[in-house]
Image (spheres, grey):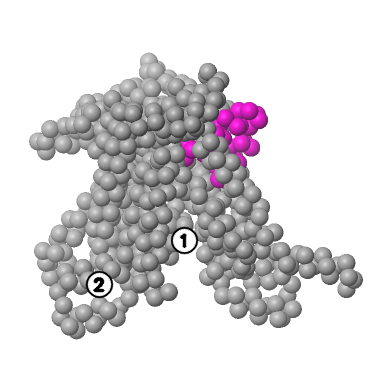
């Protein structure tokens, strides 16, 4: 082996880890550029129509703090997240329990249960919009045929938020359910056998054994669902476009209007930076909790 | 239930299961139902559960034809949107696999400085609201002439699929014991030989599942396509918003378009069911 080829070989083998990793990193680091751009531009009065982009310091953020529309959007975003996550986690847990009882046809039920999670969320929203139509929609027909009053659903200022929460829950409840199901199936047998020998009540077993052992998967579900609900755009935009009268106007949708309707890019970026900070802080906290829970349960 | 005692618990469980199944299946059933109704049936009240089915909505949507008769129709380029989706999603997936497999292998097998930080940076998009990345891309793409091109779209979509692929495949590589590789190395295989003969066959199902999941994510994506495409390159999922403004008359066609759009995702998902838990949690939960 000549000296030259050996040195080429050693360059290759010394840096192989980098050489393999770098192409992917370069392609996705592309994301840091637009991201940084957004952060920087949130300190300007960047406006596509007016063509301005002057540095205005914290101007956009001060404007935000005084903007009732922003506070409304923040409130809607938080209510949407709490409502959707609560339904998804609760119903998801119940579904996981029911789909793990060994009922007849369980395999088929599990497959059917999963279907909504793979739907394009925007398409699911359109499907539900068709069913939620106040006059000819099938939901009101079904409600009225059992003697209940119909609802304005997406069209009513008091029912719209609940309606988009339902759509989100339709798509993502199976996500929570399938992860809980995986968690339940992976539970160790021994502690339960020991509990049975000791004659512990099933409620006590559930609270003191199942919940702590499932903590890692519960935290993963919370992490993904909270993160995605705070950012949710597709479902809300496709179903209501933020209306009626800002009833479903989340920060994401509001930022969309500021940017693409009113070309107030700088102000839109300020919205998004705040939203990003909220999502990031919560995710950071939940990831930390998850790591802790994993090490408690698995001992590493 | 022969021989088994019918307890209250069992009845309640069965009722619960029926409720869950109705909740999951009814919307799909109902929208399919609407998609095979004539314009008169679809807006009739009370809604019709029994009717003469027609495939006309599908032919109108798929062929972009006008509805023959007195009803309004929407002239869309649905076949073209479908093709756009295929081009953009396949492009993003192929790119993700080409650079993602080596990167995943590198993260699984080697230690290098700042590895975890780099790996985590890949994920940062998952934490960011979509618009914070898309608006600058929109502005930059317009400036450099990438706006509305397939290249631009593929670049944007791979921002979604590549980090996901790397994280998921890293887990699949980590499942292969390194001892297998060492043994093959001792047997005289080159690095490439080991990768090809030992790793690839073992990880092939994982790569396939990752590719399919990435494709589904790309297919389902709405915002990227809605903002970064021109009319000529619009993918099918965002194109559905075009039907909204005609909703009063075009329910049947909207339903048909929705069914056509969701079909590829649902069919592909059934094939890779086994990997869904793992895939949807970026490998954090091994189902």
Q: Position of residue B248 (x, y in %)?
A: 32, 22
Circle 1 chain:
B
Query: What residue does disc 1 label?
Result: B283
- Can see residue A118? no
Question: Which stretch is magenta?
Answer: B130-159
Check residue B243 for magenta coloring: no
Residue at the far top in the pictured view: B70
In this orientation, which residue lies closer to the viewer: B143 or A39?
A39
**Residue B226 left/right relative to B247:** right
Q: CA distance from mark 2 to mark 1?
A: 25 Å
- Circle 1 packing at 10 Å, graded few (<14), some (14-19), many (20+), is many
Q: Is residue A69 shown above or below B271?
A: above
Image mark 2: chain: A
User: Does dot 2 land on a helix, a strand or a loop?
Assistant: helix
Check disc 2 and report the residue beneath it: A209
Residue at image position (28%, 68%) is: A212
Q: Quadrant of residue B285?
A: bottom left
Does the segment drawn in magenta span residue B135? yes
> In the picture shown, does residue B197 fall above or below A164?
below
């Amino acid at each position: 082996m000549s000296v030259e080829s050996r040195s080429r070989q050693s360059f290759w083998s010394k840096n192989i880890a980098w050489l393999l990793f770098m192409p992917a990193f370069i392609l996705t680091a592309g994301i840091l550029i637009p991201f940084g751009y957004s952060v920087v531009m949130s300190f300007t009065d960047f406006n596509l129509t007016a063509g301005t982009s002057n540095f205005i310091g914290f101007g956009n953020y001060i404007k935000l703090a005084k903007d009732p529309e922003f506070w409304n959007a923040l409130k809607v975003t938080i209510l949407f997240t709490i409502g959707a996550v609560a339904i998804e986690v609760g119903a998801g847990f119940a579904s996981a329990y029911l789909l793990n009882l060994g009922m007849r046809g369980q395999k088929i039920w599990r497959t059917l249960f999963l279907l909504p999670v793979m739907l394009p969320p925007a398409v699911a929203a359109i499907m539900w919009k068709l069913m939620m139509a106040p006059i000819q929609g099938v939901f009101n027909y079904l409600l009225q045929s059992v003697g209940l009053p119909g609802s304005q659903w997406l069209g009513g200022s008091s029912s719209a938020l609940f309606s988009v929460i339902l759509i989100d829950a339709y798509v993502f409840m199976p996500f929570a359910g399938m992860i809980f199901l995986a968690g339940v199936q992976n539970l160790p047998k021994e502690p339960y056998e020991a509990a049975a020998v000791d004659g512990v009540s099933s409620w006590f077993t559930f609270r003191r054994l199942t919940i702590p052992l499932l903590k890692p998967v519960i935290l993963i579900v919370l992490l993904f669902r909270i993160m995605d609900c705070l950012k949710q755009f597709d479902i809300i935009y496709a179903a209501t476009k933020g209306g009626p009268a800002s009833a479903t106007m989340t920060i994401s949708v509001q930022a969309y209007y500021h940017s693409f309707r009113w070309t107030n890019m700088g102000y839109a970026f300020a919205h998004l930076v705040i939203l990003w900070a909220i999502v990031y802080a919560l995710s950071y906290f939940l990831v930390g909790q998850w790591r802790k829970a994993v090490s408690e349960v698995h001992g590493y | 239930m022969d021989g088994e005692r019918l307890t209250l618990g069992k009845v309640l469980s069965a009722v619960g299961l029926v409720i869950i199944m109705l909740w999951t299946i009814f919307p799909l059933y109902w929208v399919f139902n609407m998609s095979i109704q004539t314009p008169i049936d679809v807006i009739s009240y009370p809604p019709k559960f029994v009717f003469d089915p027609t495939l006309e909505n599908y032919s109108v949507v798929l062929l972009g034809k006008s509805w023959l008769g007195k009803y309004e129709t929407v002239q869309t380029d649905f076949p073209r949107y479908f093709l756009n989706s295929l081009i953009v999603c396949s492009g993003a997936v192929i790119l993700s696999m080409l650079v993602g497999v080596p990167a995943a292998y590198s993260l699984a097998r080697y230690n290098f400085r700042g590895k975890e930080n780099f790996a985590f940076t890949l994920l940062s998009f998952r934490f960011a609201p979509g618009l914070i990345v898309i608006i600058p891309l929109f502005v930059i793409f317009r400036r450099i002439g990438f706006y509305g091109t397939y290249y631009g779209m593929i670049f944007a979509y791979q921002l979604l699929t590549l980090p996901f692929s790397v994280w998921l495949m890293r887990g699949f590589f980590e499942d292969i014991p390194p001892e297998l590789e060492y043994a093959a190395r001792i047997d005289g295989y080159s690095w490439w030989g080991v990768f090809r003969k030992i790793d690839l066959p073992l990880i092939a199902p994982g790569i396939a599942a990752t590719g399919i999941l990435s494709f589904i994510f790309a297919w389902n994506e709405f915002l990227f396509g809605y903002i970064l495409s021109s009319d000529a390159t619009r993918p099918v999922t965002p194109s559905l918003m075009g039907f909204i403004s005609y909703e009063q008359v075009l329910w049947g066609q909207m339903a048909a378009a929705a069914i056509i759009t969701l079909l590829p995702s649902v069919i592909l998902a059934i094939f890779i069911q086994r990997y869904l838990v793992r895939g949807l949690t970026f490998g954090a939960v091994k189902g």
